[in-house]
Amino acid sequence: MARLVDFLRPELCVMDLKAKNKEQAIRELADVLEKNGKIKDKADFIKHVLEREQLGSTGIGNRVAIPHAPTHSVDGIALCFGRSLEGIDFQSLDGQEVNAIFLIGTCPSDISTYLKILASLAQLVNQRQFLEEFLHASTVQELISVLKKFELGHKK
């Protein structure tokens, strides 16, 4: 089973994004993926994610955005997280600025795993208690611990 905790490692989390807008946030997180060897062609990856954004905002509400795209710029699954303390306008469905951004890419051949991860993430971020704890985590380790607690049912 595809689990977020299997893909979201501490080095793939940015606790204080510097980005001021949607494109800057996607670029900043793509830098993290590239630095960690998760994407082969950053420019192509960003192009696909931005094209996907033009189809409709991935700001899903509850201050969360999940920009994503299948692309040959990725081997397997690439996932990273960024938190914006100030909030970023993602043209979200509920009109609120976004504080939590999960950037996901996948090779088209891994689309079923990718869809399972998107579904898991959507389910988690619709839980008020998860979001509250996740967004208030003060360290990357605490962030991952909250994710494990809610995804795997472990208690701290």
Image (cartoon, helix red, strand yellow):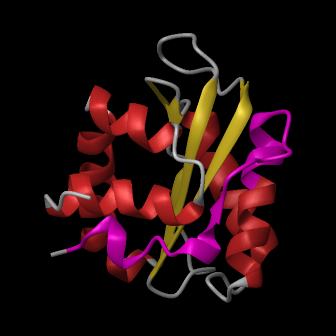
Residue 154 visible in the displayed image: yes
85 is higher (above) or lower (below) than 104: above
Question: Looking at the picture, does residue 46 appear above or below residue 58?
Answer: below
Residue drawn at the location 37% of the way across and 62% of the way down: 145
Instruction: Point out the residue furthest to the front here.
Output: 156
Quadrant housing residue 18: top right
Q: Position of residue 19 (x, y in %)?
A: 84, 42
- Residue 133 position, x and y percent, is 40, 39
The part of the chain drawn in magenta is 2-26
Q: Is residue 111 visible?
A: no
- Please tell me which residue lies in front, 8 or 105: 8
The answer to if 6 sits in the magenta stretch is: yes
| Quadrant location of the N terminus in the rendered image | bottom left
> Which of these two is toward me, 26 or 49?
26
Left or right, 12 with reference to 123 = right
Measured as percent of width and height from the top left, residue 29 is found at 71, 60
Residue drawn 73% across the image and 65% down it: 30
Write down the quadrant of residue 27 in the picture. Answer: bottom right
In front here: 106 or 79? 79
Q: Quadrant of residue 98?
A: top right
Q: Judge from the rendering whether residue 125 lies leftward or rightward of residue 12; answer left or right.
A: left
Q: Is residue 42 magenta?
A: no
Quadrant including the C terminus? bottom left
Q: Position of residue 52 (x, y in %)?
A: 58, 46
Q: Pick whichever, 140 or 126, lies toward us.
A: 140
Q: Identify which residue is drawn at 54% across, 30% down.
A: 56
**Position of residue 133 in the picture relative to residue 148 (left or right):** right
Taking the view exactly as shown, the residue that stands out farthest to the top is 95
Q: How many marks?
A: 0
